[in-house]
Amino acid sequence: MKVSEAVGRLLVERGVRHVFGLIGSGNFDITLAMVEAGASFASSRHEGGAITMTDAFGRTSGELAACSVHQGPGLTNTITGLTEAVKSRTPLLLLAAETAAGATRSNFRIDQEALVTSVGAVVARLREPATALADAAFALQLARDERRPIVLMLPLDVQGAECPPGAPPPVQPSVQPPEPQADGVRKVADLLAAAQRPVVIGGRGALGAGAKEAIEELADTTGALLATSAVAGGLFAGNPWSIGITGGFATPLAAELVSSADLLLSFGATLNMWSTRHGRLVAPGAVVVQIDIDPEAIGGHLQARAGIVGDSAATARALTRELDRRHQRREGWRSKDLAERIARGGWSQQPYEEDTAPDSIDPRTLSIALDELLPAGRTLVVDSGHFMGWPPMYMAIAPDRGFIFTQSYQSIGLGLATAIGAAVARPERLTVAALGDGGLLMSLPELETVARLGLNLLVVVYNDAAYGAEVHHFGPLGKPTDIVRFPETDFAAIARACGLEGLTVRKPEDLAPATEWLAGDRGKALLIDAKVVPTVVAEWLEEAFKGH
Ligand SMILES: Cc1ncc(C[n+]2csc(CCOP(=O)(O)OP(=O)(O)O)c2C)c(N)n1
Ligand SMILES: [Mg+2]
């Protein structure tokens, strides 16, 4: 058996059940071996789509998937999505074919290792036929244990060689996160015991198994309110003490409450400029405490009074145990009156002056209408751009990874492939992809993928015929914005040409066919081209520009 086939089989035997990718000569055999061993394969139309689908699959399901690409240009096409996955620490395996060491004149030859390490990915390689299985097993283990993307280089000569017979390497036990240090737990418990108005903030590092429940229990013990960073939106959905996302997207009430907290305790959240409005949501004198598996995250953006390096779930449990041991249980600021204010505090309950235009819809009105129309159990995926606040602010986020937000690299154009990966991971749940017109045009080839895979997917384009973020950034500075405005694009027609259903929406009544679509078998995905009023400007945007 050839190395390519043996490695493909081994990866599937060790739990890689889903592969995204785009096939060329260098990755044909290994991918086919994985499919024949029982893995599912979804082809993208651009490798940038494949890597982002793999990332999104992992974020949505918690299960590691693989991405398979051709050597050279197949790999260079993945770089933006790979960077996003690196920065958001998604465990995944990127299987990259590689020209043989001796093929120095190959057109495909580049320094693949230098390329991917430059964006922070870690490289593993099939070194020689005799070590290939151990190398592949190591790469997979590393991705899982270190929770990061690993690029497994597959030199063509090694792939094509005979795999020496012999038992595959033994499965290593996975690394368990260390228990938090007792003195750190005591110190944080002292601070919590002294706090009158604590707020707990869950971030990306709190999305793992068991953390939500452990943090909610700790919050109950301390009388804390619960908030999330944007990427962890929906983590505490349904909890009566949850005030939603903190930072730019925060409701007026959430902003008021976070900025009157006397203690902020974060679990796996960096407390960066986005979640604190450049620190302005943190009251002078408020105690900041951070829990993170990454020591560098602690105090990275704000001055932290204390920190514990540890897993979110284990540390929250240790803190609750310590407070229980001290019989420290308090209501904090959890009053009946506050519960009522929180229940009424959502964005869609706040009055706003609707911007009506004859041929376009206010993006807030659109989002509220969609929220009412769509099933509550859904995966909401949001691309980057000016529009990106409207969906998470005006549409409820379902618990259990109901919100996938690819903002770690702040790239536009990742939303559609993210939605595809999410829809493959959770086929039973409707995936809603909220995209800007710019972001969709950057990822257009994957509309064909949506149709071909028959996904349970709704694409909503917040179409202002512009790179709106740039219009609203530079327009107020008195600069001409013609270079970031475009003629109208008829996305409904493009969708139909790709095999989706297409609908143009200029007013709420235009959404009626979407109701029918939802009630039907959804055999074809639906794309809604919503022509949004381009002059409704998001307040959070001003914050964002201060970060440039
Ligand atoms: C790959 C990439 N290119 C450029 C940018 C700069 N950029 C940020 S938002 C934006 C406009 C996005 O337009 P659209 O998707 O239509 O959303 P809108 O801002 O109009 O709501 C651009 C070009 C970026 N973040 N990423
Ligand atoms: Mg736009």
Image: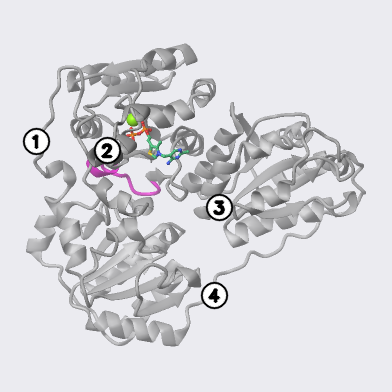
Residue at (83%, 51%) from the top-left corner?
A: 132
Q: Work out whether mark 3 precedes mark 1 in sequence or the reverse, and give the earlier one.
A: 3
Queried on whether the Cβ of the residue with tag 1 lies below 8 angstroms from ligand 1, the answer reads: no
Q: Nearer the viewer, mark 4 or mark 1?
A: 1
Q: Nearer the viewer, mark 2 or mark 4?
A: 2
Q: Is mark 2 within 8 Å of ligand 1?
A: yes
State the residue position of label 3: 86
Q: Which mark is residue 472?
A: 2
Q: Which residue is mark 1?
A: 353
Q: Which of 448 and 40 lies nearest the eye of the viewer?
A: 448
Q: Secondary structure at mark 4?
A: loop
Q: Give me the residue at 86% from left, 44% from top.
A: 158
Residue picked out by circle 4: 178
Bounds of the magenta span? 392-401
Question: Cα distance, mark 3 to mark 2?
Answer: 30 Å
Judge by depth and name the residue closer to the eye, 328 or 178. Answer: 178
Q: Dot 2: few (<14), some (14–19), or many (≥20) neighbours within 10 Å? A: some
